[in-house]
Image (spheres, rainbow, N blue to C red):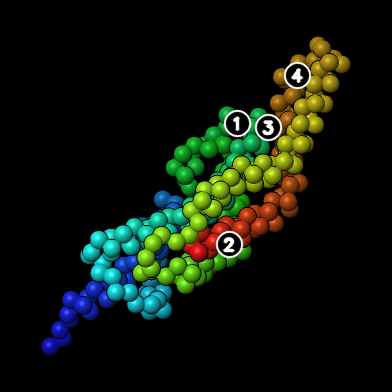
């Protein structure tokens, strides 16, 4: 007859529950895999599989999961997972902001459609850059690097330690990447469209009878699409640099 003591049960719970909490929190908030289109069963299955691989490598902890300290430890793991997921969300939000600025300058700020990744309406250019960023992220094996970074976080901040590790002020400052990176990504298109608008202004002064509204919008729209096409080689390395910075920041906030 197999008998299981309460101490053994607590040890198994400690070994599984806390890593599973951090992994589930990351999967729920991370880009691509955290979207509503990713099946919930797949999220849970991925979290359980990662926990089964990571849990045997973690040090044992003597904290009772049902005690007050155990509840605090559960909240600690939840905050770490959410913080790591939001770190990568900031990168995609910066790319989305670049699309918002470009679309506004092109005159497509009114063209908004439903975005399945955010469950909200977003400008067309923002959705386009978001899909492009997702493809670049998957092409550079970003999902695998995200999992590797998650596993590495269990060594830099293993479950069972007292206190709340990580520089959370650093995570708050990382939010400024949305404005900084968004403007830098959209800067080439902003410059091209600014020159176009200046040329149209000069044309209007030279020929006042010209209907600038009839010809200005098609010209701005066409030059915007042409500039977006020519800027494609510029976007890819900058997307990769942002993703690498986000993965590095994930580890830095856990130390």
Mark 2 against mark 3, which lies toward the viewer?
Answer: 2
Check the image and name the residue furthest to the left: 1
In the picture, the disc for residue 212 is: 4
| Crowd class of label 1 (few under 14; some 14 to 19; many from 20; radius 10 Å) | some
Classify residue 244 by image quadrant. bottom right
Q: Secondary structure at mark 1?
A: loop
**Residue position for label 1:** 109
**Residue position for label 2:** 248
Rendering coords of residue 137 (x, y %)? 58, 59
Q: Nearer the viewer, residue 74 or 106?
A: 74
User: Considering only order in the chain, which callout, 4 or 1, is on the residue closer to the N terminus?
Assistant: 1
Residues at marks 1 and 3, CA–CA distance in whole angstroms: 8 Å
Rendering coords of residue 190 (x, y %)? 72, 36
Pointer 1 and pointer 3: residues touching (CB < 8 Å)?
no
| Crowd class of label 2 (few under 14; some 14 to 19; many from 20; radius 10 Å) | few
* Residue 111 seen anywhere in this rendered image of the structure: yes
Rendering coords of residue 2 (x, y %)? 15, 86
Q: Secondary structure at mark 3?
A: helix
Q: Nearer the viewer, residue 160 or 150?
A: 160
């Amino acid at each position: 007859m197999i008998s299981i003591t309460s101490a053994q049960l607590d040890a198994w719970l400690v070994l599984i529950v806390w890593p599973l909490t951090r992994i589930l929190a990351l999967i729920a908030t991370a880009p691509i895999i955290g979207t509503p289109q990713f099946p919930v069963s797949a999220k849970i299955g991925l979290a359980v599989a990662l926990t089964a691989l990571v849990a045997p490598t973690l040090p044992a902890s003597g904290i009772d999961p049902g005690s007050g300290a155990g509840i605090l430890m559960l909240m600690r793991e939840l905050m770490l997972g959410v913080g790591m997921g939001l770190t990568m969300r900031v990168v995609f939000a910066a790319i989305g902001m670049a699309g918002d600025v470009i679309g506004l300058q092109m005159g497509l700020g009114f063209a908004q459609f439903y975005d399945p990744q955010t469950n909200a309406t977003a400008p067309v250019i923002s959705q386009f850059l978001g899909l492009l960023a997702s493809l670049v992220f998957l092409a550079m094996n970003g999902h695998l690097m995200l999992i590797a970074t998650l596993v590495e976080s269990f060594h830099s901040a293993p479950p069972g330690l007292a206190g709340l590790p990580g520089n959370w002020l650093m995570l708050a400052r990382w939010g400024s990447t949305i404005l900084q990176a968004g403007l830098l990504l959209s800067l080439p298109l902003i410059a091209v469209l600014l020159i176009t608008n200046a040329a149209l202004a000069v044309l209007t002064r030279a020929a006042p009878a010209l209907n600038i509204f009839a010809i200005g919008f098609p010209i701005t729209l066409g030059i915007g699409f042409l500039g977006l096409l020519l800027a494609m080689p510029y976007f890819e390395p900058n997307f990769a640099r942002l993703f690498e910075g986000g993965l590095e920041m994930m580890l830095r906030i856990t130390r």
